[in-house]
């Protein structure tokens, strides 16, 4: 199938604000020269399909029931349906929607092996794995010793539970001056000034694509704490991938998706121990990053991800 006959479908008017939609659909779709089209709640699927004449539709992160009607109409017209699942939405209304979309789809695409296993177990569908693509420009690895270390945490506020856990561990580090920068959609309200150690300072800035780019470049170390739970275990590699791509030594929680990349980072639930190891041997950290960037080019580059989408389309 020609890629121009396939379209990515989003059902939010601001898809660029949702990282999973950008990384799984918008960026690879535009690279391939595909159309990325909006289908909203008040739109008629018959009119939509008549206008755009796709032979295959790829449904991205589903925020409501809108895409079910589109998938049903597509199937009735023998238009192939592919659904992307990227979050642990297996219960309640979102779970019911995703089950229906799985039943209507010719292919289900996920970004990790744990997500594939979960979809198989709960929805009974085999999945094709296509990872999230690298989004930011490549930066050569850098790490220099200094009196105060700048550590960056970035992410949506829905992940503040992981940050709270991470800070409880990291606050036990009392031997170094640390400046922690938080980049998110709203300031954290769970950090009480009286519990912040004297050697720590914490700053907040509002997230944007451009701000994340500059914050990663300015930081010495990136920090990706997490919690062992099903919702976290199925998520994509993108935060660690972007950290390695930015040339920054990174401390991450040993979730399954991060263990796949543990040779290129500091994958340890003992965040203080990982920090000490990293700072004690910065040359080793740089060697990890150089190898990691070479690995990213093979698996997460735009070219590598585009080939996987091409392979999918060539099946039809």
Image (cartoon, rainbow, N blue to C red):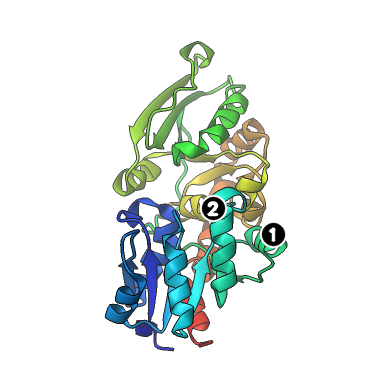
Q: In the rendered view of the protein, which quadrant contains the N terminus? A: bottom left
Q: Residue at x 53, y 54 (%)?
A: 289
Q: Is residue 238 left or right of residue 47?
A: right
Q: Answer above or below: position of 313 versus 225.
A: below
- Where residue 163 sits in the image (x, y, percent)? 53, 33
Farthest residue to the left: give it. 51
Q: Looking at this view, is 295 or 92 the one in front? A: 92
Give the number of the disc on residue 75. Answer: none
Q: Looking at this view, is 286 or 304 the one in front? A: 304
State the separation of the CA atoms marked 1 and 2: 13 Å
Picture quadrant of residue 73: bottom left
- Where residue 180 sits in the image (x, y, percent)? 45, 29
Give the number of the disc on residue 94. Answer: 2
Give the number of the disc on residue 122. Answer: 1
- Where residue 25 sits in the image (x, y, percent)? 41, 66
Q: Residue at x 64, y 38 (%)?
A: 227
First in sequence: mark 1 or mark 2? Answer: 2
């Amino acid at each position: 199938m020609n890629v121009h006959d396939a379209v990515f479908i989003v059902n939010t008017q601001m898809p660029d604000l949702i990282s999973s939609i950008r990384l799984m659909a918008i960026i690879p779709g535009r690279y391939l020269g595909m159309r990325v089209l909006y289908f909203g709640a008040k739109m008629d699927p018959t009119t939509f399909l008549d206008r755009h004449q796709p032979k295959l539709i790829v449904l991205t992160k589903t925020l409501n029931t809108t895409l079910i009607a589109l998938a049903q109409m597509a199937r009735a017209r023998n238009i192939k349906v592919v659904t992307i699942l990227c979050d642990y939405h297996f219960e309640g209304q979102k779970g019911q929607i995703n089950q229906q979309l799985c039943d209507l789809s010719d292919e289900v695409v996920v970004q990790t092996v744990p997500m594939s296993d979960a979809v198989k177990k709960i929805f009974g569908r085999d999945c094709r794995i296509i990872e999230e693509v690298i989004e930011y420009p490549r930066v050569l690895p850098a790490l220099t010793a200094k009196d105060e270390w700048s550590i960056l945490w970035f992410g949506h506020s829905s992940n503040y539970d992981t940050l709270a856990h991470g800070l409880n561990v990291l606050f036990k580090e009392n031997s170094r001056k640390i400046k922690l920068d938080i980049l998110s959609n709203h300031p954290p309200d769970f950090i009480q000034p009286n519990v912040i150690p004297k050697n720590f300072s914490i700053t907040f800035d509002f997230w944007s694509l451009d701000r994340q780019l500059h914050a990663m470049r300015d930081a010495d170390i990136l920090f990706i704490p997490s919690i062992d739970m099903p919702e976290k275990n199925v998520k994509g590699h993108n935060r660690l991938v972007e950290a390695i791509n930015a040339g920054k030594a990174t401390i991450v929680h040993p979730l399954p998706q991060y263990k796949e990349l543990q040779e290129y980072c500091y994958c340890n639930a003992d965040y203080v121990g990982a920090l000490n190891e990293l700072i004690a041997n910065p040359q080793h950290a740089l060697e990890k990053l150089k190898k990691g960037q070479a690995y990213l080019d093979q698996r997460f580059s735009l070219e590598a991800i585009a080939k996987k989408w091409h392979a999918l389309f060539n099946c039809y």
